[in-house]
Amino acid sequence: MPLVDLGRLGFDAGAHLLVKHGLAAVAVGESIRVSGQAPGWQAQLAAWCQAQGHALQTPTGWLRQPALLVRRGSAQAGRW
């Protein structure tokens, strides 16, 4: 499973582009792992996934997880 490491990059500074690129490398329904170190990156990722039609798998204690799983949705595949 591919890993996208955001490092200290926040979504306000372009982290979403790295996630989008990572998701483009997998088929609809497949997942990538995303990790980061920027303050609040998990909440920013959750909001972005919801807005873009992707599923964020959030296990118990997800705010303390080193990496979260994002499952690619079909919304981007249907856009032209």
Image (cartoon, rainbow, N blue to C red):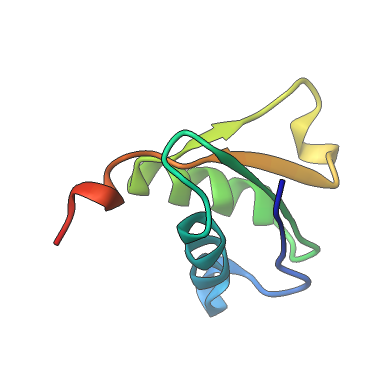
Q: Is residue 36 left or right of residue 50?
A: right
Q: Position of residue 39 (x, y in %)?
A: 74, 61
Q: Position of residue 43 (x, y in %)?
A: 60, 46
Which residue in the rendered view is the most extreme toward the top?
A: 60
Q: Is residue 15 left or right of residue 79?
A: right
Answer above or below: position of 15 versus 46: below
Residue at image coords 77%, 20%: 60
Residue at image coords 85%, 39%: 64
Residue at image coords 59%, 40%: 31
Q: Quadrant of the C terminus?
A: bottom left
Count numbered badges in the picture. 0
Answer above or below: position of 36 versus 14: above
Q: Quadrant of the N terminus?
A: top right
Q: Nearer the viewer, residue 52 or 75?
A: 75
- Image quarter for residue 59? top right
Q: Is residue 80 left or right of residue 16?
A: left
Answer above or below: position of 80 versus 7: above
Q: Position of residue 10 (x, y in %)?
A: 63, 70
Residue at image coords 83%, 39%: 65
Q: Nearer the viewer, residue 51 or 74?
A: 74
Q: Nearer the viewer, residue 41 or 22?
A: 22
Q: Is residue 17 left or right of residue 40?
A: left
Q: Nearer the viewer, residue 75 or 37?
A: 75
